[in-house]
Image: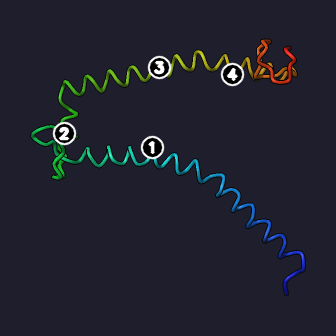
Amino acid sequence: MVAAGAAPTARAGRRRRLARLVLLGPGVVWWVAFFALPVGLILAYSFLERGPFGGVVAEPTLANYRRVLDPLYLRVFITSIRIALVATAIALVIGFPAALAIAARAENGGDPCCSGSSCCPSGRAS
């Protein structure tokens, strides 16, 4: 036997799930279109052979991955990793203190988004 209050609760649950899907949909479509598909294409092309005039020949090969161990490509790879590590360190050195300052300002009752300029939408600058 089903209780009288069960139907509205189930309906509300379905409505919440539908609302989540509707809100999640545009983000998922954007992610697939501009991240997952391009990365998938690059991955697929990485297993194909280079054509004589710069194109791609549909012959699967692992030669591209063997070429990574070539000294030229290895040096480029190591340089790329070094640049990524330096950029990450710089972002942490700048971002962590900034995040602490914003959190401290919000904790003290101030508006964390405004730094005392006229940018405050409420018109008050602290």
Q: Amino acid at mark 1?
A: Phe
Labels 1 and 4: the sequence-earlier one: 1
User: Which residue is identified by label 1?
Assistant: 35
- Taking depth in this image into account, of 40 and 96 the one nearest to the observer is 40
- Taking depth in this image into account, of 59 and 79 the one nearest to the observer is 59
Check contact, mark 1 vs mark 4: CB within 8 A.
no
Q: Amino acid at mark 3?
A: Ala
Q: Identify the element where label 1 is drawn.
A: helix
Disc 1 residue crowd, few under 14, some 14–19, many 20+, Cα 10 Å:
few
User: Which residue is identified by label 2?
Assistant: 66
User: Which residue is identified by label 3?
Assistant: 87
Labels 3 and 1: the sequence-earlier one: 1
Disc 1 and disc 4: Cα gap in Å?
Answer: 28 Å
Residue found at x 58% / y 47%:
27
Expressed as whole percent of the image width and height from the top left, the position of residue 99 reads 68, 22
Left or right: residue 63 compared with residue 27: left
Left or right: residue 6 compared with residue 100: right
Its colouring scheme is rainbow
Residue found at x 86% / y 19%:
123
Q: Nearer the viewer, mark 1 or mark 4?
A: 1
Expressed as whole percent of the image width and height from the top left, the position of residue 57 reads 16, 48
Extreme residue in the bottom direction: 1
Residue 99: numbered disc = 4
Labels 2 and 4: the sequence-earlier one: 2
Q: Nearer the viewer, mark 2 or mark 3?
A: 3
Check contact, mark 2 vs mark 4: CB within 8 A.
no
Disc 4 residue crowd, few under 14, some 14–19, many 20+, Cα 10 Å:
few
